Structures are given as structure tokens and as C-alpha cells.
Image (spheres, rainbow, N blue to C red):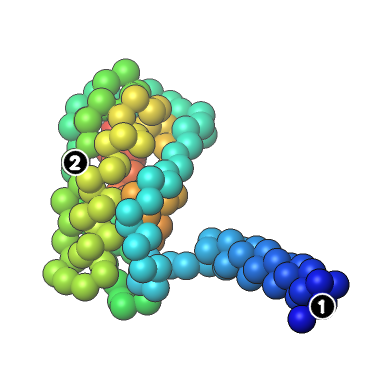
């Protein structure tokens, strides 16, 4: 093969591999808990704290169950959260899924949630993806809503 043909071929192959890599990166955010192999091994976590509804919240330990939908059906988790001066000081999530991906993702979520929420203001706290688990956060946020209502009473 002539050197100029070889260079064009290498250039074309390099361009194709860049396009493939970009396409793979663009599709990575679309995965859900039940279809993202290995998603639980990532350290991607997001949490936000705001001041919405930041009235006085009573100190104490609160329990709530949060339900959420998955492609496999309805799931739930149990959340125990301790609050002092409006700040989360401790959290325990007890997985309730009985098997499959939901159980695996709930376990991963439970193992990483304390790093995300302890030290955050309860008033505007909301989580997204924790330890690769994105849908379990919906159940956690539902439990947070109940806990905030109990703490405001």
C-alpha cells in the first residue's frame, strides 16, 4: 500500500474511533439502574441543599418508607435519619427489595448515602445518583418529604 493511502486510511480510522468514543460517552447518561451494567461501581453522587421550606425543624430521629418505580415494578426503602439544628447528622437506609437489580442497587445506595447527606441541611435536601444508583434516590427523596413533614410538626 502506498504511503499516502496508508496515511488516509489511518486518518479515517482515527476519525471513526473518535466518533465512536463520543457516541459512547453521549449515551452513557441514558442508562437506568436496571440496564446499566456496572453502574453501581461508580462514585457519582449528587446532592443539593437549599432553603425551600426551611422553617424550624425539630431535632430527633425520624423513620419513613420511600417508594419508587423501576422498570421491574414498584420498590421501596426504609430511611432512618437523625437531625440536629436542621442538619442531617446520621442516616441509615434499609433496602427492602428482595432480589435482582433492585436489591443490588439498593445495597449500593445504602452504602454510599451517608457520604452524600450527613452534614447537609434537611430543609432542601434532595439526592440524585448515589453510588451508581439513580432510581433508588426517588424513594429516598419520597422518604425525605415525609421526614421533613414530621420534623416540621
Percent across and percent down for residue 76 are 24, 62
Give the residue displayed 82% in from the left and 78% down from the top: 2
Specify the quadrant that holds the C terminus. top left
Mark with earlier residue (1, 2): 1
State the residue at coordinates (39%, 73%): 35
Give SS at disc 1: loop
Q: Residue 41 falls in which quadrant of the image?
A: bottom left
Q: Which residue is mark 2?
A: 92
- Numbered mark located on residue 22 in the image: none
Coordinates of residue 109 in the picture (x, y in percent): 28, 51
Q: State whether residue 141 appears in this view.
A: no
Observer-side mark, 1 or 2, equals 1
**Residue 25, can we see it?**
yes
Q: Which residue is mark 1?
A: 2
Element type where label 2 sits in the image? strand
Residue at the top extreme? Answer: 85
Residue 138 drawn above or below residue 19 = above
Label 1 packing within 10 angstroms: few (<14), some (14-19), many (20+): few
Q: Is residue 14 left or right of residue 2?
A: left
Asked whether the beta carbons under mark 1 and mark 2 sit within 8 Å of each other, the answer is no
Q: CA distance from mark 1 to mark 2?
A: 66 Å
Residue at 38 percent across and 45 percent down: it is: 43
Residue 56 horizontal/vertical position (percent): 38, 23
Amino acid at each position: 500500500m502506498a504511503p499516502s493511502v496508508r496515511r488516509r486510511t489511518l486518518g479515517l480510522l482515527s476519525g471513526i474511533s473518535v466518533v465512536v468514543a463520543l457516541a459512547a460517552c453521549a449515551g452513557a447518561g441514558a442508562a437506568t439502574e436496571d440496564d446499566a451494567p456496572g453502574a453501581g461501581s461508580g462514585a457519582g453522587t449528587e446532592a443539593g441543599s437549599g432553603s425551600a421550606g426551611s422553617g424550624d425543624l425539630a431535632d430527633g430521629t425520624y423513620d419513613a418508607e420511600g417508594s419508587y418505580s423501576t422498570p421491574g415494578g414498584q420498590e421501596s426503602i426504609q430511611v432512618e435519619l437523625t437531625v440536629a439544628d436542621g442538619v442531617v447528622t446520621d442516616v441509615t437506609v434499609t433496602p427492602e427489595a428482595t432480589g435482582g437489580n433492585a436489591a443490588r442497587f439498593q445495597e449500593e445506595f445504602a452504602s454510599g448515602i451517608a457520604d452524600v447527606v450527613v452534614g447537609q441541611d434537611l430543609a432542601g435536601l434532595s439526592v440524585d445518583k448515589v453510588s451508581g444508583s439513580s432510581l433508588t434516590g426517588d424513594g429516598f427523596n419520597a422518604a425525605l418529604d415525609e421526614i421533613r413533614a414530621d420534623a416540621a410538626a
